[in-house]
Image (cartoon, rainbow, N blue to C red):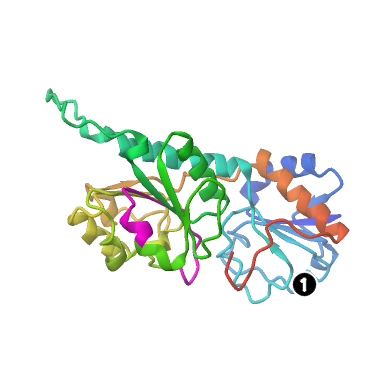
Amino acid sequence: MRVFFAARAGLWDAWAPALRAACPEIELTRTGDPASFDALIYAPGFPEDGSELDFTPFIRARLVQSLWAGVERIVTNPTLTQPLCRMVDPGLARGMAEYCTGWAMRAHLGMDAYAQDGTWRHGAVPPLAANRRITILGMGELGRACATALTGLGFDVTGWSQSGRPVAGIPTLPGPALHQALARAEILICLLPDTAQTQDLLNADTLALLPPGATIINAGRGTLIDETALIAALDKGRPAHAVLDVFRHEPLPPDHPFWRHPGVTVTPHIAAETRPTTAAPVAAENLRRAMRGEPLLYLVDRSRGY
């Protein structure tokens, strides 16, 4: 099985050994006749000259396996006719759950309220987790992992997704109930993909539905939030704080107002990373399925964009 590594050269040293260990039968390479490859391993940033990859010459390829969970930077490529699969990495899901749980706990406990200035703030006692309402927008693999971690700590967690597909143990609201999902969200965790339906989902109107003093944690996509509307809403205290890990333009420009706003915490897109050791077995399984003509895992629905 010949596999083309369509990713930046800097990723080769970490990924090539992991992929070969997980799938010893592959011939993994970065060069060769496109018509000779049975599959591609893809990550955004390739080609490195900034052009869009032309998939047309890969006439034998039965699979394009993304190394990223998000596929918005490839799914609209008009030359892509091969099956595209997104990456569902158990290590990435674990990392996302840890990130969101950590920041949710910080908001829940009000840890930033205790300035070390000699003032005894005994009145700032948080409720127990069972009395703290958390809403998670996006109940895919990452949303479910976060919901499981947070319910394990006793939080009152409700999910929301466009489909409203039931999730075991987690009340999940459907698309039309977005207002209800936001109105209860003392802590709002955003893990939605970037699609036409999710862009600017949090805008002036929807941000106003949040309870006063709410916290937003966005580790999904920067396009989910209207940035101008968020700053205006923060100035009004609804929400009171936003922890942002993803942005419309990355790296976030040094002169962006988020850096200076007292209601914003910026983290540099580190909530969750695809880890070769845990992701390579997922790619290996799909490579084998493609060669055997079996159903692929995590096949992208291009009409939905993920």
Numbered-mark total: 1
Q: In the rendered view, tell whether residue 176 sits above or below residue 167.
A: below
Name the outermost residue toward the bottom. Answer: 78
Is 182 within the magenta?
A: yes
In this picture, residue 187 sits left or right of residue 291: left
Callout 1 crowding tier (Cα within 10 Å): few <14, some 14–19, many ≥20: few
Is 40 within the magenta?
A: no
Residue that badge 1 annotates = 57
Q: Which residues are magenta?
A: 180-197
Choose top left, top right, bottom left or bottom right for residue 183: bottom left
Q: Is residue 181 visible?
A: yes
Q: What percent of the width, then of the height, locates residue 173?
A: 46, 59
Q: In the rendered view, tell whether residue 2 sits above or below residue 96.
A: below
Q: What percent of the width, then of the height, locates residue 277?
A: 67, 38
Looking at this view, is 279 or 268 the one in front? 279
Q: Quadrant of the C terminus?
A: bottom right
Looking at this view, is 214 or 174 the one in front? 174
Choose top left, top right, bottom left or bottom right for residue 265: top left
Q: Quadrant of the N terminus?
A: bottom right
In this picture, residue 253 sits left or right of residue 194: left
- Tell me the element at label 1: loop
Q: Is residue 96 visible?
A: no
Q: What percent of the width, then of the height, locates residue 211?
A: 26, 53
Q: In the rendered view, tell whether residue 108 sits above or below residue 161.
A: above
Residue at image location 78% in from the left, 49% down from the top: 285
